[in-house]
Image (cartoon, helix red, strand yellow):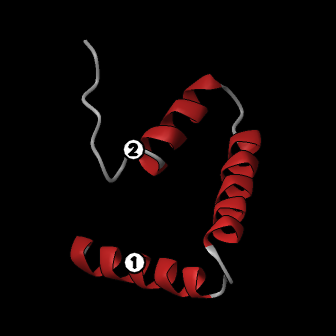
């Protein structure tokens, strides 16, 4: 199930990327989406959860103890 989800997510991301004319337009879109998602968070715990799950998912950052 996880692998299927990952493939679906990659497919969606690849399709989204093809909709943009150039890299700067794509970066603008991604920055706007992240900013909106952060504004939707209720408190700092939600923000950290969002950042951990979204931004750092690809390159697992070890948590400090």
Above or below, 33 against 16 in this view is above
Position in image of residue 64 (x %, y %): 28, 16
Which residue is denoted by mark 2 in the rendering? 56
Q: Residue at x 77, y 41 (%)?
A: 39
Left or right: residue 20 versus residue 65 is right
**Quarter residue 62 falls in:** top left
Q: Which element type, helix, strand or loop, lies under badge 1?
A: helix
Q: Position of residue 15 (x, y in %)?
A: 53, 87
Q: What element carries label 2?
A: loop
What mark, if any, has residue 28 been given in the picture? Answer: none
The quarter of the picture where residue 24 lies is: bottom right
Q: In this view, does 63 lie to the left or right of 19?
A: left
List the residue tagged with mark 1. 10
Contact, mark 1 vs mark 2 (Cβ under 8 Å): no
User: What residue sits 65% from the left and 69% below the top?
Assistant: 26
Residue at image coords 67%, 81%: 20
Question: Where's the C terminus, which quadrant?
Answer: top left
Q: In this view, does 17 lie above or below 33?
A: below
Local crowd at mark 2 within 10 Å, few (<14), some, or many (≥20)?
few
Name the side, left or right, on which 24 lies relative to 54.
Answer: right
Horizontally, residue 49 falls left or right of residue 28, namely left
Name the outermost residue toward the top.
65
Q: Distance between the residues labelled 1 and 2?
A: 16 Å
The x and y percentages for residue 27 are: 64, 61
The local crowd at label 1, few if under 14, some if 14 to 19, many if 20 or more residues have their Cα within 10 Å, is few
Q: Which one is in front, 25 or 8?
A: 25
- Residue at image point 74% right, 55% down: 32
Tally of marks: 2
Of marks 1 and 2, which one's residue comes earlier in the chain? Answer: 1
Residue 5 point in image, percent of width and height: 34, 76
Q: Is residue 21 above or below residue 52?
A: below
> Quarter holding the N terminus?
bottom left
């Amino acid at each position: 199930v996880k692998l299927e989800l990952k493939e679906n997510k990659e497919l969606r991301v690849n399709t989204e990327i093809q909709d943009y004319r150039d890299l700067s337009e794509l970066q603008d879109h991604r920055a706007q989406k992240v900013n909106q998602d952060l504004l939707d968070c209720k408190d700092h715990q939600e923000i950290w959860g969002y950042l951990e799950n979204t931004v750092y998912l690809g390159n697992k950052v070890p948590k400090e103890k």
